[in-house]
Amino acid sequence: MGQDEIFKNERFENMENHYREIPKFRELLNYDKLIERVKQKDEIISLVSKLHWGMPEEVQKYAIKMIENTVNEDDYDLLIISGHTFTRPNIVEILKDAGYPKNRKALPSLILLLQDLNWPGAVEGMSVMKDAGKSALVPMLEIAIEVAHNTNDEDWLGWIKQFLEFAEINKSDFVNCEVYDLLEHVER
């Protein structure tokens, strides 16, 4: 089994563990179809594996250039989900350079990075999300808040609250203001 195949198998196992507990996000991400698409995109998995910060800089730069030039924006949602933790800073940079609306399909995965702003790429992802605008984010943020609340994930709620302040998203921006109220007790 080659390095890309090992990387691919580890990613699918990690993705399944990560998304198992968050059915609403599975639905938002269209998770089952997403996994099938990832499995059919060996070239993306191979390029993303080269974004690992432990790879030589010239390999990372080559992979960034290849992704920017060859990966269709309809597959941008596959980048974070097919990457390792240590590929995220480069992936977020690619998504930042692509800009909104080209990076729109990756927004749910970026919101998942708000589970812990200490994760590589999470803080940088906040700027990418902010640039997408309130109307693109609020429906997904409402789902994330509900999921975090229902799973008692106070840390995720706190990071979401911090992001809302950063992105200047207020209660009046929410469609369901009751969801926003779930953040009242959260400290950050």
Image: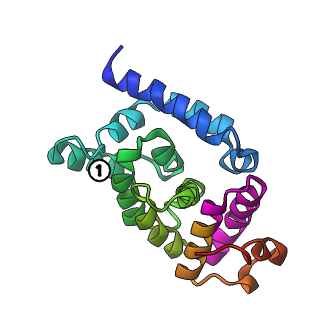
Q: Quadrant of the C terminus?
A: bottom right
Looking at the picture, how far across and down is residue 174, in whole percent? 75, 77
For badge 1, the amino acid type reads Ile
Residue at the spot x=51%, y=28% of the render?
40
**Does the stretch in magenta take in 139?**
yes
Q: Is residue 181 above or below residue 142?
A: below
In front here: 84 or 161? 161
Q: Residue 141 or 120: which is nearer the viewer?
A: 120
Q: Position of residue 121 (x, y in %)?
A: 40, 58
- Measured along the vertical axis of the image, is residue 166 above or below residue 137? below
Main SS class of the magenta portion in the image: helix
The quarter holding residue 122 reads: bottom left
Image coordinates of residue 60 in percent, x first then y, are 23, 46
For image coordinates 22% across by 50% down, the residue present is 61
Q: Residue at x 53, y 34 (%)?
A: 14
State the image quarter where residue 165 is shown: bottom right
Label 1 element class: helix
Q: Which residue is mark 1?
A: 64
Tell whether 40 sits left or right of 55: right
Q: Which residues are magenta?
A: 134-157
Determine if the magenta segment contains residue 62.
no
Q: Residue at x 65, y 48 (%)?
A: 29
Q: Quadrant of the N terminus?
A: top left
